[in-house]
Amino acid sequence: MIDRRQLRDFDVGLFVTMLIIVIIGVVMIHSATHAADGGASSLVKRQFLWAGLGIIVLTVVMFISQDTIDALAPFFYAVALLLLIAVLFVGVGKTGERRWFDLGPMRLQPSELAKYATIFILAKYLARKKTRLDRPIHLAIPLAIVLVPTLLVLREPDLGTSIIFLLMLPPMLYWAGMRPVLLLIMLAPVVSMIIAFNWVAWLVFVAVLAWLLYVSRLFVADKLLVFVTTVVMGRLSPFLWNHLKDYQRHRVLAFLNPEKYRFSTGYQLIQSKIAIGSGSVFGKGFLQGTQKNFAFLPEQHTDFIFSVLAEEFGFAGCAIVIGLYLYLVIRMLRLASQVRNRFAALTIVGIAGALFVQSAINIGVTLGLSPVTGMTLPLLSYGGSSLLVTMTSIGIVLGMGLRRMEY
C-alpha cells in the first residue's frame, strides 16, 4: 500500500504534462475531423472517453507494487507472445495485414501490450545481480527476448512497431551498465544491413570495423562473433528486402525519392511537408488548415496529426509539443535516477525509451526524415487502445516514483 508520506512524492509535473498532451490531442482530432462533419465528431467523443478511462486505469495501476510487476513479468511476456501469435490468424487490418483484434466497440493491438511486456521481462533479467554485460556474447539473451516479439510483429506485418522493439533495448542496456563502446559495436550489424546495397560503402565499412576490432581489447571470440554477425547481416540484407511486402518497399523508395512516387506512396510525404511548410511560424489558425480541410492530407487524425498541428499552429506550436514530449521523457529519466529498486529504474527507462522512439519516428515521418511507418504519435493521435496502454504505462512510472525509496 501507499501511505500519505509517499503520496507527497507524486510527480505532478509528469502527470500534468501527460494531461496537456492528451488535451492537445483531443483538440487536434477535433480539428482534423471538423471539415468532414462540421462539428464534434464521434471520434473526438470516443477519444475523450478513452482518455477518461485512461486516467482511471492509470490511478489503479499506481497502487500495484513494483514487486508484483516484477513477479508477473514472465506471465505478461508469455501472454503477449500468445496474443501476437493469435492475431496472425484471427486479426484484422486496413489493407490485408493482421494487427488488431476486433472486439466490437474497440480494436485491441497486441503489439502495444507486447512492448511493455517485453520491457518488464528485460528489466527483470537485467536487474539480476548475476547478469553480466561486459562482453558481446552477453547480449544473446536480451537480444533473444526482444527478437521473438519483433519477428512476430514483422509477420503482421508492422515494420514500424517492430523497430520500436529493437530501439528500446539500447537505453535499457546502457542503464544496466553496458559500456557505450559495446553498444556501438552492437549497431554494426544494423549499419551493415543498411549500407549493404552499395558494395563499395559496405566493403569500406567492413574493413574499418575489422581494423577497430583488431585494435580493441575484446576477446578473440568476441571479435569473431561481431565480425561474422556483421558480414552475415550485410549479405542477408537483399534477401530481407525482397521479403518485405510490396507496400513496405514502396514506402522506402518513396522516402528516398518522393517526387517520383508523388501520385502513389510518395503522396503522403509530399502533402505532409506542404502542410508543415505552409504553417510558417505561427500557423494559419485553429480549424483553418487548407491541406486538412480539403482532405489533401491522408490519415490526418492518426499518423499525420502532427502535420495538422504544424499547419494550424506553425513552428511555435510544434516547438511547444516537442518540448512537452522531451519534458515527459526527462521527468521519467529523473525518476529512474531516483528510485532505489533496480527493476523499477530499468522499467522506467524502457517506457521512456519506447515513448521517445515512437514520438521521434512519427514526427520524423511527417517531416520527411523517415519512411512512412503507419505509426501513431503517442497520447496525441486518435486511437483508443494505444491511448489507454500509453497512459497505463505512465501510471506504472508514477507508481514506481511513489515507491522510489523502496529497494
Image (spheres, rainbow, N blue to C red):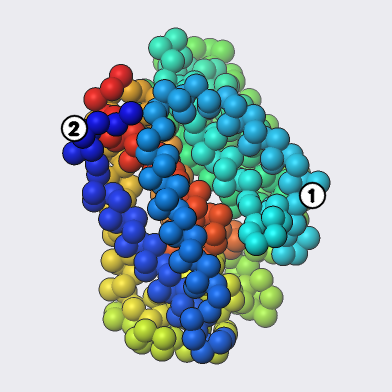
Q: What residue type is labelled 1?
A: Val
- Residue 44's label in the rendered image is none
Q: Mark 2 points at which residue?
A: 5
Q: Judge whether 264 appears above or below 200 on screen.
A: below
**Looking at the rendering, in which quadrant would you find the C terminus?**
top left
Instruction: From this view, report whether residue 137 is shown above or below residue 81.
Output: above
- In whole angstroms, how far apart are the C-alphas of marks 2 and 1? 48 Å
Coordinates of residue 50 in the picture (x, y in percent): 49, 60
Whether residue 72 is visible, yes or no, is yes
Q: Measured along the vertical axis of the image, is residue 327 above or below residue 280?
A: above
Image location (x, y in percent) of residue 289: 44, 86
Q: Nearer the viewer, residue 128 or 79?
A: 79
Residue drawn where x is 58% and y is 21% of the image: 140
| Mark 2 residue element | helix
Quarter occupied by the N terminus: top left
Number of residues whose C-alpha sits closer than 10 Å to that of mark 2, classed few (under 14), some (14–19) or many (20 or more): few
- The kind of residue on which mark 2 rests is Arg
Name the residue at 48% across, 81% down: 40
Which corner quadrant of the image does residue 117 belong to? top right
Image height of 189 relative to 216, above or below: below
Looking at the picture, tell me which residue is in the foreground, 267 or 298: 298
Question: Looking at the image, which is closer to me, 212 or 136?
Answer: 136
Q: Is residue 336 left or right of residue 136?
A: left
Picture coordinates of residue 191, whole percent (x, y): 55, 41
Mark 1 burial class by Cα count in 10 Å: few <14, some 14-19, many 20+? few
* Mark 1 secondary-structure assignment: helix
Look at mark 1 in the image and give the residue it sits on: 90
The residue positioned 70% from the left and 35% from the top of the image is 82
Residue ID at (50%, 21%) = 71
For the image shown, how many numbered marks are present on the structure?
Answer: 2
- Name the spot of residue 398 as percent of width and height, x first: 33, 41
Instruction: Mark 2 vs mark 1: give the one in front.
Output: 2
